[in-house]
Structures are given as C-alpha cells and as structure tokens.
Amino acid sequence: MALTKPNQKKTKKSQIRRISDWLHLWLGIASGLVVFHLGVTGCIFAFQKEITEFIHRKQFFVEVPANKQTIALSKLKATAEKALGGKKKVTFISSYSQADRAWEFGTYKPGDPKAFWYFDSIDYYDLVLINPYTGKVTMVTDYKYEFFGIIKMLHWSFLINHPIGQQIIGWSTIIFVFLLISGMVMWWPKNLKKSNFDKSFKIKWKAKFKRINYDMHNVLGFYVMTICLMLALTGLVWAFQWFQATVYVVASGSTTPPKEVSAKSDSTKTINAIPFDVAFETAKKTFKNAERIGMSPAEGGSATIYATGYKGAETYWNFDVLLFDQYTGKLLARKNQSDKNAGEALIGMNYDIHVGAILGLPGKIMAFFASLIAASLPITGFIIWWGKKKKKKNPAVAEN
C-alpha cells in the first residue's frame, strides 16, 4: 500500500482553466433550475403529437368511404363554428392528404396584450376536429388549457406574457451554451491513454455512487453536447430578436429583410360559387404533393384568403403560399419555398430543428434524450459540488 503525501506535486491548471472551472461552477448553480425546467418540459413536449393522437385516436382518425368524397370546406367551417357556439369565427383550417385524418378547424382571439400571465393574454383558443366525409364533429378542445399547450408555454416563458419571461429563459440558455463549451474543455482528456479514454467515454457502473454520478455528468454531457447546443441556439432565435436577426444576416449574407408577398381583394367583383371553396379547390390542384393544406379565411374588406401547402406530414418549414381574392376565389399571388433566401429558410426551419421533427421520429428521440440528460446535468453537477464541499481533508490518501 502506497501513500500519497499532501505536498506531492500535482499538475497545475492554467489561469484560464481555473477561471473557466470557477465560472462553470457558479454559473451552473445560478442557471441550474431554469436548465432543469427547460429539459423536463422539453422531454414532455417531444412526443406530444404521438401521445395526443394515441389517447384520442378515435377523434383524430376516421373511417374512409369508398368514394372518398369530402364535404365542401365552407360547410365544414360552418359546422365547426356552430360547434363553438355560433359566436366564434374559424381563423385557421388544416386539411390532410392522409385519407383517414379528421380535419382541424381552429379559432383564436388574443386577450389583454399587457397581461402578465399567459392565460390572461388569450381570450379564447379552440380547436374542432371534424370528419370531412360526414361532417360529424369528433372533438372540441379548449386549446388555451390543453396540457401540451401549457407545457409549451411553460417551456417558452414560464407562462409569463411579459418580456421578462423570455428574458429569463434566454439568458439562462446563453449561460447553458457557455456551460456546454466550458464543460467540453473540462472533459477533454489530457492524452489518449486507455485509462483516460475509458474515463472520458464510459460510465463506470460498478463504481460507487459518487463516481457514477461524476461519470453521468461528464460522459453523458459529452455525448449530447452537440444536440444540446442545437436545441439551445434554436431556442435563442425566439428569445432574442437580435439573435434571430444575426442568424438571418449570417445565413442570407444580407441585411435586407425578406420581401413580403401581398395582394388585395377586389370587392367590386363577385361570383355565384362560394369563393372560399373555389380557392380551396384551386389550392388542392396546385398543391398536389402537399401532405396538408392550411386555409385562413380573409379578415377585412380587402384582405385575402391564404392557402399554405405543407410538404411534410408534420414539419412546418417546407411550404408554399397562395393568396386568393375573397370575393371571387381568384389566385392573386404565390410565394414558393424555393423563392426564400437562406436566411428565411433557416429561420423557417427553427421550430422543426428545435423539436427534432426535421429528422422525423429519430430526431424526436434524440431531442428527448438530449433534453432528459440536459435536465440531469444541474442535478449531477450540484451533487459533485456538494460532495467536494463536504469532503474532509485527509493528511494522506491510501492507494492499493
């Protein structure tokens, strides 16, 4: 048995490394609760679509008749508004190319814009599911209080409508980015000896709790670092306008904002058919390869009907837009995904990257486990710090 003397020389850390370690510790303690919150809510939200459709399968999916003939969209819209009590107007609709899907009809009205809490900032937010073949309402949901909707807003801003909510989230996320980078510096093995390699890349499950906890903090943190960085940076796009503007400028190579496509309806012209149905039929023919088509009725005298063709079954980034005259259903303008510059495209992909949906189910699984591990890092890190704080100083350490 050998003894290591207290005054035995040890490798000294550089000044920069000591500062990095100190900042990693105290910034981690300062932001730990927020990072834990973001990780947990991110985990819960990751499979919200799959969970919701599994629980309400009979409401989201319908039997398909032999002729596959759907009822006119204007009639389905009227049915949805009746189901909502007759006083709320449908503001957005989602129809699906998947034959056995119920169609979604939503209505939204903002509340007090100066309200401090999320719930006070919304007057109502409802979603109606309808069988497009029979016109039967399969479900009416108060989305203002829907579970995953609340989880999303908790993740977004702690249910705070005031800018301070996202400021807390945003600055904590910036700290988390620093922690990931400084953690990588602390993790980096001094050399590639097998002992260092195993310590950096493997968890020693047969060791005592203290060592297992240490390995879970360092090893798992390393494995999810890239994904966590992606989640953090995409979160910052929403948290700070200056960060979103920076991403746009870097990606597009220009400070010129994207050109908006606009058009106006002409109230002096009318047709015998229902313009909304005419616009929808044109959208279906135009968006033959779209997985779903979003329709937004016109609001106001010269406003237009919007039709959005999404090319992904679940993602939102890849879409084309059509604008129709609300009085005639005539196509007035179009903007394609291919027309967008790199900045627009990247900002448009932000949500799908953040939730992992851009890579389908594998991407969601990665986002889930990265969020889970991110939530664990403040806990394992605190245990490491607490153990060091309580550790008794021994005059000599026995070695076998």
Image: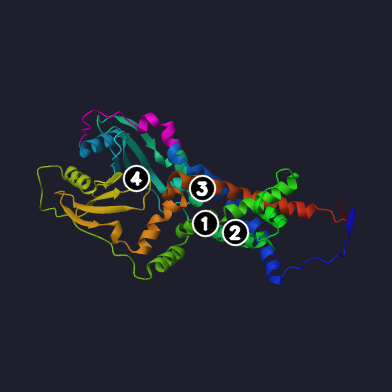
- Is disc 2 placed on a helix, strand or loop? helix
Q: Would residue 200 appear left or right of 9 to someone viewing this image?
A: left
Query: Between marks 1 and 2, how big is the CA–CA gap?
Result: 10 Å
Q: What label sits on residue 108 in the rendered view?
A: 4
Upstream in sequence: badge 4 or badge 1: 4
| Mark 4 neighbour class, 10 Å CA radius: few under 14, some 14 to 19, many 20 or more | some
Q: What label sits on residue 264 in the rendered view?
A: none
Upstream in sequence: badge 3 or badge 1: 1
Upstream in sequence: badge 4 or badge 2: 4
The range drawn in magenta is 51-71
The x, y position of residue 369, in whole percent, is: 55, 46
Query: Between marks 4 and 1, how big is the CA–CA gap?
Result: 29 Å
Mark 1 — residue?
232
Query: Between marks 4 and 2, how big is the CA–CA gap?
Result: 39 Å
Question: Are the residues flagged by discs 1 and 2 in contact, CB closer than 8 Å?
Answer: yes
Question: Are the residues flagged by discs 4 and 1 in contact, CB closer than 8 Å?
Answer: no
Query: Between marks 3 and 4, how big is the CA–CA gap?
Result: 32 Å
Residue 350 falls within the magenta-colored stretch:
no
Q: What label sits on residue 180 in the rendered view?
A: 2
Residue 51 to residue 187: above or below: above
Report the amino acid beneath label 4. Tyr
Q: Nearer the viewer, mark 4 or mark 1?
A: 1
- Whether residue 3 can be seen here: yes
The x, y position of residue 291, in whole percent, is: 31, 44
